[in-house]
Every structure is written in structure tokens, then in C-alpha cells.
Amino acid sequence: MFSFQEKSLWLMFVGLVAGFGFYFATVLPMATVDVMPQQMVLFVLAVFALVLMQIVGHVLIAIIDRRSGTDERDRLIALKGTRIAAYVLATGVFLALCAALLTRGNFIFTHVLLAFWVLAQLTEIGAQLVMYRRGA
Amino acid sequence: MGKGGGFITNDIRGLRQRHGDMTQQELADQIGVTRQTVNAMEGNKYSPSLEVAFRIARVFGVRLEDVFQYAE
């Protein structure tokens, strides 16, 4: 049976995949030199949908699972997850800097950075979910 | 698995059973952790902090070594 923390992590994982999956699937086929206003609108929409999904989802989880407290194991797992994700994010920052230097416009730079931020989040959440099941 | 090659086991499940079939939730409430953490400890998937380890021993009225064992 999943704990409150695990349910919350699954919700964030699915939300990120759905929200940014939609964004990248829509925006990448129409790649431009610079980020266009309509692409920014799509980004805002994806973030808004993600936030809304998180609020509604967490309210539902809190209703289903009344025990929402955290303890030392939750904090340890969160810290370990953050440490693993930091490597992914650092790689993304380096590649985004390379893209900024080697490509024209800001589209590729922006989207490499955004993609690796999303990937870092997914790695952090995924690592935590594995640790909850296999041990920290 | 610890860094020295050994690992920590425990007898929390046995102690619960010998204390009136105490549930994981009852123990968790007394030592200030979640039921899932008690379950992880019993499955040797998580080694608690010293503070929680001492709280567990205190709940059962035994020494720390009666709850946790270090196996080489």
C-alpha cells in the first residue's frame, strides 16, 4: 500500500510527464530560432495545468489518506533524491551553455535547459519512488 | 548494508508480537515515525537514527542490543 508521500510523488511524476510531454510534443515540431510568443503561451498553459492538477490531486490524496506526516526516513529519501537529480541538472546547465555558444537564437538554449530541469525533477521523483520500495 | 561490510538486523516484529500483538501503527505513533517506516525497519530496508532506535527500545523496555543486532 502506498504512503501519502508515495502517492504525492506519483502524482507529481504523472503531472510532469503529462504537462511537459504535451508542451514538448507541441512545441518541438515547430522549432524556431527564437522562442515565439505562442510557444510562451503554451508553456504558461502547461505550467497552469500542472499546478491545477497538483492542487486537486493533493486535496484528493489528503481526503483518502488522513495520515500525511513525514519522518526521518522521508527526509533522508528526499535528500538522496535531490543529490541524484543535481547531477542531471548540472549536466543540463553545461549542455545549455554549449547550446548558447554554438547555436543561433534562444530556442535551443531555452529548451535544453527546460528539458533537463524536467528530467532532473523526474529523476529526483523516480529515485525517491525506488528508495521507498527497495530501501534507503 | 553498512560501509564496513556488515548490516543491521532487528527483532522489532518479534518484540511487537510479544507485547500484546502491538500493531505497526501503534508502535509508529509511540516513536514518532510513520507506519511505513516501521514496516521498512522490520524488512531491514531502513536503519533508523539512534534517537528512534532508543525510543523503540524504551517502548519495549529492553536494551538497544535486544532490538538491533549488527551482523558481519
Image (cartoon, coloured by chain):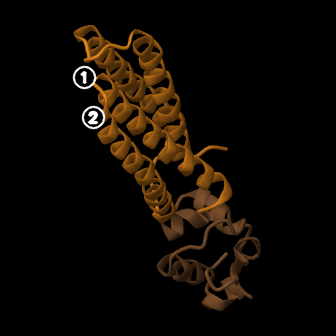
Chain colours: A orange, B brown
* Tag 1 secondary structure: loop
Q: Which mark is residue A105?
A: 1
Q: Which residue is mark 2?
A: A100
Depth check: give the residue in front, A40 or B64: A40
Tell me the residue at 40%/53% (across/down). Answer: A86
Compare marks 2 and 1 and give the one earlier in the sequence: 2
| Residue A80 image position (x, y, % from top left) | 48, 60
| Residue A69 image position (x, y, % from top left) | 44, 52
Question: Three-letter amino acid code at disc 2?
Answer: Ala
Tell me the residue at 54%/50% (across/down). Answer: A128
Q: Is residue A11 above or below residue B6?
A: above
Q: Which mark is residue A33?
A: none
Question: Three-letter amino acid code at disc 1?
Answer: Gly
Task: Classify 10 Å Cα crowding around label 2: few (below 14), some (14-19), many (20 and above).
Answer: some
Task: Farthest residue to the front: give it.
Answer: A102
Give the alpha-carbon distance from disc 2 to disc 1, as whole Å.
8 Å
Residue B20, picture quadrant: bottom right
Chain at tag 2 = A
The quarter of the image holding the N terminus of chain B is bottom right
Tell me the residue at 77%/75% (across/down). Answer: B14
Q: Is residue B44 above or below residue A118?
A: below
Depth check: give the residue in front, B43 or A24: A24
**Left or right: residue B71 compared with residue A125:** right
| Residue B50 image position (x, y, % from top left) | 50, 81
* Tag 2 secondary structure: helix
**Left or right: residue B60 compared with residue A54:** right
Q: Is residue A67 visible?
A: no
**Left or right: residue A7 compared with residue A97:** right
Q: Please say if the residues under marks 2 and 1 sit with CB atoms less than 8 Å apart.
A: no
Tell me the residue at 70%/68% (across/down). Answer: B42
